[in-house]
Image (cartoon, helix red, strand yellow):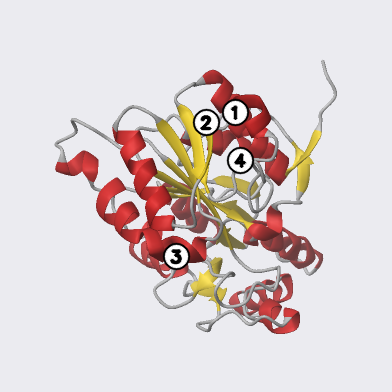
Amino acid sequence: MSEPIEFTYRDALRLALRDAMTADSSIIVIGEEVGLYGGAYGVTKGLIDDFGPERLIDTPISEAGLVGAAVGAAMTGLRPVAELMYVDFIGLAMDQIANQAAKIRYMFGGQIGVPMLLRTQGGTGRSGAAQHSQSLEAWIMHTPGLRLAMPATVTDAYVLLRHALTLPDPTVFIEHKALYTQKGILDREQPADWGQAKVLRAGSDLTIVTYSRMVHFALEAAGSLADDGIDAEVIDLRTLNPLDRETIVASVAKTGRALVVTEDTLTAGVSAEIAAILQEEAFDWLEEPVIRLAGEDIPIPVAPELEAGSIPSPARIISTARKLMRR
């Protein structure tokens, strides 16, 4: 048996693309500087050497153009991977994403679909300021017809991306910019378990529901809470559409308390939807109200200290959990 190999999150994504493109000749990558340059965050670096410019296609600086081209390519038999440098630019292509890709299967009565993948990145951590640091997953989650994955770990980055490239529907794949250098052991044979959340840490006192980079913050906080005698269960949602309601509700039914942690904004965000689900489906087991801990309802500051203060931190997760436990 070979020794386990440590990968970065970025390298796991690149390997997933390489393996998928090797297995399926219909997969192409299209975006700004995805070919010769290797992508804004280096995920596609070197793939043009393996697959050539016919399958690694550099486009003009037009998000509407490149996503529209990907929609058309998907409708005509290819399986495109469109890369947006930043999720902040998704508004420039929202007609193509929300009005075309998401609706074509329905509008055509199932006769044709859009099996495309939209890769992008979001979140804070690099002082990108207000126009390059947002968490806009609620926009995607709100749109029927779109699938949405937000992996937190090296293995999930690989297996979820590979699985997304087999789906018949358009999928948005949001990678957190602060995770690209995160390291971990890659298990390429792990089942994707698409649409299933994972309990990364079992606990009995409260449930912390989260995804993407906040998973790591929640696990760090849960370790500190354990030193104080608070046993926190940590759930990584992994995909937001489909959303694994059953795992969330079952956990809260066991612990009686729920803390939802997200980097996107508090108002009308992902945390609001999850809190509503728990209020409707787990009310009889709740010993305390569901608490949301989310990003501030402000443009993201550029100053590192202010940026860090605009989103949940391990310390804030700890203090909020103590409040929930009345400690």
Mark 2 or mark 3: name the one nearer the start of the chain: 2
When the figure is inspected, residue 99 is found, relative to residue 301, above or below; the finding is above
Q: Is residue 134 left or right of residue 18?
A: left
Estimate the spatial distance between the alpha carbons at disc 4 and disc 1, rounded to whole Å. 8 Å
Residue 144: x, y in percent? 28, 52
- Specify the quadrant of the image occupied by residue 262: bottom right
Q: Residue at x 65, y 41 (%)?
A: 36
Mark 3 or mark 4: name the one nearer the start of the chain: 4
Local secondary structure at mark 2: loop
- Specify the quadrant of the image occupied by residue 234: bottom right
Q: Residue at x 44, y 29 (%)?
A: 166
- Specify the quadrant of the image occupied by residue 313: bottom right
- The amino acid marked with disc number 2 is Arg
Q: Residues within 10 Å of mark 1 (few under 14, many from 20)?
A: few
Query: Where does label 3 land, which residue?
Result: 270
Mark 4 or mark 2: name the one nearer the start of the chain: 4
Q: Is residue 17 visible?
A: yes
Q: Is residue 284 visible?
A: no
- The amino acid marked with disc number 3 is Val
User: Which label belongs to residue 52?
Assistant: 1
Estimate the spatial distance between the alpha carbons at disc 1 and disc 3, rounded to whole Å. 39 Å
Local secondary structure at mark 1: loop
Q: Are marks 2 and 3 in contact (CB under 8 Å)?
A: no
Q: Looking at the picture, tell me which residue is in the foreground, 206 or 121.
A: 121
Estimate the spatial distance between the alpha carbons at disc 2 and disc 1, rounded to whole Å. 6 Å
Estimate the spatial distance between the alpha carbons at disc 3 and disc 4, rounded to whole Å. 34 Å
Local secondary structure at mark 3: helix
Residue 83: x, y in percent? 52, 48
The number of numbered badges drawn on the structure is 4
Q: Are marks 2 and 1 in contact (CB under 8 Å)?
A: yes
Query: Where does label 2 land, which residue?
Result: 55
